[in-house]
Image (tube, coloured by chain):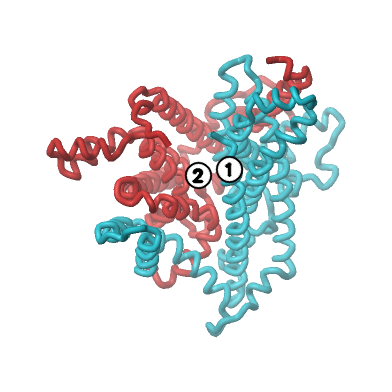
Chain colours: A red, B cyan
Amino acid sequence: MSAYKPRFGRVVPTIVLVISGLFFLAPLLTLARFALQNVPTILLGWSTLFDKWSISGLTKAFDDPAFWPALKLSLELAGGTVLLTLGLLLPTAIWVHMRIPKARALIEFLTVLPYMIPAIALVAGIVVVKPHARWFLDSDYALIPFYVVLALPFTYRSIDAGLRAIDLTTLVDASRSLGAGWIETLGRVIVPNLRAAIVSASFLTAAVVMGEYTIANTLLKETLPRFQRTFTGREPQAGYGLNLLALLVTVLLFAILSLVTKKRERSLISRLSRKPT
Amino acid sequence: MTDITVTANGGGRTAGAAPSARRSWAWLGLLPFFAFLFLFLVVPAISVFYDATRNKDGSFSLAAMKQAFRGQNLDAFKFSVSFSAGAAAVGVVFGTLLAYAAASATRPRWLRSLVTSFSGVAANMGGLPLAFAFLSLLGKQGVLTKILKAAGWDLYSGNFGLGEIPGLITVYSYFNIPLMVLITLPAIDGLKQSWREACSNLGGTTWTYWRRVGLPVLTPSLLGGFLLLFANSFSAYATAAVLTQNSKIVPLRIGFFLGGDVNVGEDAVGYALAAWMIIIMVISMSLYWVARKRAERWQS
């Protein structure tokens, strides 16, 4: 009731929301202006506000010979990281839920360890180990397992939440008693029920990999973020365009993601089969 | 590899009331996961500590660990800690305000979900694009810089710079505030209307309510949020790499040592910086963990 809400309690939230909106929109708008409008800031004013806008700033990076190899490497790394993440975490999480629920706290703790060892400290360790494992670490694809580690806190939580939402034991028992083997149970019963969790884990992983700069830069791997940095130094306007594009793709990924997860929350089946905790 | 499974095995046995052979075999299923973490997280982390505590001849020595707190390295730590603490404080205050505003605004129904969805995106939006976005807004050639100058306030006449403390705090707020929103929103939702009514029935004012009920309940969340934002700001690399020069923050200084532009033997200092960073992160994240557990008490 409004009796408990003084007028002050209405005005302040509105002001906070408006200021926050401005703060979060402004950098994106000015980034877009630099990318799309070919007018130096010195000359920017009311008279030139609508001059020389063009979409070409967004696509100019595509003409650079180094762009496509960098994009290809980043996409390959993202794909590899997603596959390794799912290949490692799905069986582990299912196993923990079915066989050793007691290990859940331990596994949860282990998956947040990467928060304590940030990317720059992890890459310091990689540099130490490098002379002993050149055969592996010289390859560009050696980044994949480390990217799995970086994304681990997000990905495990997402898969774990998915597993909590379904009655795994009943599903598996039903499937097994109908004569399905383990592989079939995994592929045709568990994975379809975890689709939303798998999609969100994959998107988060891809977003982490496509933006990862620290490790790639220190190990001199020519990924997209590294190209972004050097290219923006060479060609500011087109570089800003590329960064805008990277930002838009990330936002799009997350927007799709929130749609997917919302759909899951709305689904009646998952609500009915949610275990009481 | 074996070490970890053995301890895990032991842990399962001591924790279980009736250890069955079946249960111990079940731990084997976690072997790939433990082995993976061991190889790609534990080994690099231990290697950092190992190399940070070695002399040039390979014997044990704490010289590098001490060197990491002298001269320019100490300056980097001071700079990093002060701007991270500042960024965390700003993030806590504005993140909580924004979360409260989103939780209490009922009028447009989509507003709350907009704030939470956007926070989910922006909390992960560090990295290069963010740095460039702020350069276009508040850099020397930034649009806002020009607008403010036209209005008579020359930002760059003083010490302002996006690589200085106020500048970095502003930029990091872009991902810190949304992260704080995600942390405090459940806590704010946990504040029950009935507590407010009870307080008012007992003759309390809004001030009494916040002073005696609201803030004490929120405190663990706010403290936890501060620690998480501090750790988040302290370890961020990519954004700062664009905005600052001369590697004056700790992550960039580690990168500088790893880059190999230093004398042989000096690289242990880089590893020592990384080791100290891990120690600081472990402390702040462990405290965060404790605060979170306390905060969850009121969230049902």
Which residue is rendered at x = 64% and y = 53% of the image? B234
What separation in Å lies between label 2 and label 1 (alpha carbons)?
Answer: 9 Å
Q: Dots 2 and 1: beta carbons under 8 Å? A: yes
Where residue B170 appears, as percent x and y from the top left, is: 71, 40
Where residue B271 appears, as percent x and y from the top left, is: 57, 68
Query: In screen coordinates, is A124 left or right of A160?
Result: right
Res. A235 in view: no
Q: Callout 2: 10 Å neighbours few (<14), some, many (20+)?
A: many
The amino acid type of the residue labelled 1 equals Gly
Query: Looking at the image, which residue sits at the far left?
Result: A179
Q: Secondary structure at mark 2?
A: helix
The relative height of residue B121 versus residue B273 in the rendered view (above or below) is above
Quadrant in the rendering for residue A196 = top left
The residue identified by callout 1 is: B126
The amino acid type of the residue labelled 2 equals Gly
Q: Nearer the viewer, residue A256 or A187?
A: A187
Query: In screen coordinates, is A266 left or right of B140?
Result: left
Which residue is rendered at x = 43% and y = 37% of the image? A277
Which subunit holds the residue at mark 1? B
